[in-house]
Amino acid sequence: MGKTFHCIDKTMAKFKEFLTIFLCRHVLSRDLKGVDKMVTREQMIKDVAWRVGYTKADVKNIMEGIYDYLLDQLARRNDIRVFKGITFESVMMKEHEIRNVRSGEMIRVPPLISIRLKVARSVRDFVNDKYHRLYEDKFEEENKEN
């Protein structure tokens, strides 16, 4: 594991750039009719390996290490600022009771941790600006046809 975390420290700037681009890709991969395309884990590993110059196996180990670390910290109710403007937040939901609609019986729901992803306005603006720059021509073509 020590080697994995050394790699993380060594290439954090490249991962920061990639994560921003990866988050943009979800928005940019929407076709103009609104159908989402999912970026698979394998595609993400391949893209990161190409960008940072590591093998896919090394990138896979690093990503699994980051994933395990994130889950561990969130289970401890720690908030995690992954990069500037992107934060995982763990929120404790209180114990409460709900009513079973069919039987009318009250059911106790234990306290749960809810995980939220908070994205700064600057990141959202970047994603939207990039989306509009890439698809500006297609939007103009659609407007001319209509």
Image (cartoon, rainbow, N blue to C red):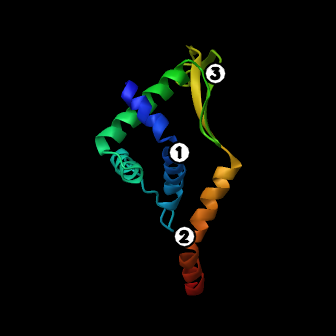
Whether the residues at callouts 1 and 2 have beta carbons within 8 Å, the answer is no
Q: Which residue is mark 2?
A: 134
Q: Which mark is residue 13?
A: 1
Q: Residue at x 59, y 70 (%)?
A: 133
**Dot placed on the residue nearer the N-terminal end, 1 or 2:** 1
How many residues crowd around disc 1 within 10 Å: few (fewer than 14), some, or many (20 or more)?
Answer: few
Q: Secondary structure at mark 1?
A: helix
**Dot placed on the residue nearer the N-terminal end, 1 or 3:** 1
Q: Which mark is residue 32?
A: none
On the image, the x and y values in percent for residue 109 come to 57, 16
Q: In the displayed structure, would residue 14 be above or below residue 93?
A: below
Kind of residue sitting beneath label 3: Met
Q: Write down the quadrant of residue 82 in the picture.
A: top right
Q: Which residue is mark 3?
A: 93
Kind of residue sitting beneath label 2: Leu
Q: Residue at x 36, y 46 (%)?
A: 45
Q: Residue at x 54, y 70 (%)?
A: 134
Whether the residues at callouts 1 and 3 have beta carbons within 8 Å, the answer is no
Q: CA distance from mark 1 to mark 2?
A: 24 Å
Question: In what quadrant of the picture does the C terminus appear?
Answer: bottom right
